[in-house]
Amino acid sequence: MGVAPHITALALGHKLPKIMATYNKHEYLDERKEALEQWSDKIEILVTNNNVVLLNTNR
């Protein structure tokens, strides 16, 4: 999806690595919002996909 690893980590509620967390105090709210919106769009496509063919599992 093209989201930077540190944005993904923050969006998931993880902490940044120690040195990065020490010097990088930016919260990346806009970037985190965009990443979560992309993930939401991806889930929406998977849930509402109408071209799924159910296979008969009764043998």
Image: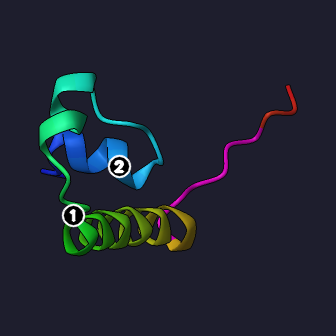
Residue that sits furthest to the front in the current view: 22
**Image marks 2 and 1: residues in contact by CB distance under 8 Å:** yes
Pick the quarter of the image with the C terminus.
Answer: top right
* Up-down relation of residue 39 to residue 20 (above or below): below
At label 1, counting other C-alpha atoms closer than 10 Å, the crowd grade (few under 14, some 14-19, many 20 or more) is few
The reply to whether residue 21 is in sight is yes
Q: CA distance from mark 2 to mark 1?
A: 8 Å
Q: Which residues are magenta?
A: 49-56
> Which of the marked residues, 2 or 1, is nearer the chain's N terminus?
2
Residue that sits furthest to the right in the current view: 58
- Quarter of the image holding residue 14? top left
Taking the magenta stretch, the answer to whether it contains residue 32 is no
For disc 2, the marked residue is: 10
Q: Is residue 46 left or right of residue 26?
A: right
Label 1 element class: loop
Label 2 element class: helix
Residue under the point 87% across and 33% down: 58
* Up-down relation of residue 35 to residue 14 (above or below): below
Residue under the point 30% across and 35% down: 16
Q: Which mark is residue 11?
A: none
Residue under the point 27% across and 26% down: 17
Question: Which percent across, then down, holds residue 38?
Answer: 30, 67
Q: Which mark is residue 28?
A: 1
Amino acid type indicated by mark 2: Leu
Question: Which percent across, then down, holds residue 53?
Answer: 57, 55
Question: Which percent across, then down, holds residue 6?
Answer: 22, 41
Q: Nearer the viewer, residue 24 or 7?
A: 24
